[in-house]
Image (cartoon, rainbow, N blue to C red):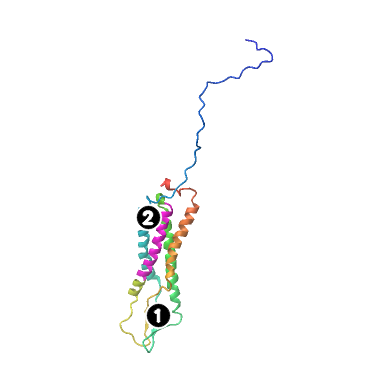
Amino acid sequence: MSEQPVGEQAAPHRGPEYPIYPPPEYAWRRPVPRVVVKRDLLPAVSVLSTVALLGLAVGWLWSRLAPPQRKVITQDGQAANLTDESYHRFDALVIFMLLCFAAGVVAAVAVWYLRERRGPVVMVAATAGGALGGWLAMSVGKAWADGRWPAPATVQPLDIVSVPPPIESAWAILLWPLGTALVYGVLAAMSGMDDLGRRLG
């Protein structure tokens, strides 16, 4: 054994020399998700048309659920309201509003399951399709209700006739797009992914 002089420390052992690379000029940053427009245009058109066609089903269902309003024929041949029958005007409007809102919720959830197309483009298409579907439901619903409760050919005084249910306010169709936008926005807010899970589709 070699003796080490007193007061001197052994030099630390150095491993093999490795080349020291310069630090990268730019630090890596997580890519920011961007709105995809061009690739989602064609699916958005399909979503808009499909949601709008749902208005046919809503209109038919309303024509079956909305109660008619019974009226009595007076001596001068005019139709007068019976007691409490005017409440059915409100019933018909509320049924239409509930159906539109339910259709908006169903449309939003169904479109949300299109994972590869999630984003504002498809949401706007679903909302616009809901507005068009509400207008279509109101139009065809009135037509089907008129066909279900046709006006009698001849009436006599004191006859009781059934009048088709009306939709008193056209603003009721807005519940469909509002319901779609609200539910889709809530689902997007609850998603913990920056891209709403598109890459997992």
Position of 162 relative to 22 (above/below): below
Picture coordinates of residue 60, whole percent (x, y): 36, 68
Q: Which residue is farthest left?
A: 153
Packing grade of label 2 (10 A; few <14, some 14-19, many >=20) is many
The type of residue carrying mark 1 is: Arg
Which residue has dot 1 on it? 70
Q: Quadrant of residue 9?
A: top right
Q: Nearer the viewer, residue 139 or 58?
A: 139
The type of residue carrying mark 2 is: Ala
Picture coordinates of residue 15, whole percent (x, y): 55, 21
Q: Which label belongs to residue 44? A: 2
SS state under label 2: helix
Picture coordinates of residue 97, whole percent (x, y): 44, 68
Which residue occupies 37% across, 67% down?
A: 59
Please check the rendered image and state whether residue 134 is part of the magenta-colored stretch, yes or no. yes
Q: Nearer the viewer, residue 73 or 168?
A: 168
Position of 29 relative to 111 (above/below): above
Q: CA distance from mark 1 to mark 2?
A: 44 Å
Packing grade of label 1 (10 A; few <14, some 14-19, many >=20) is many
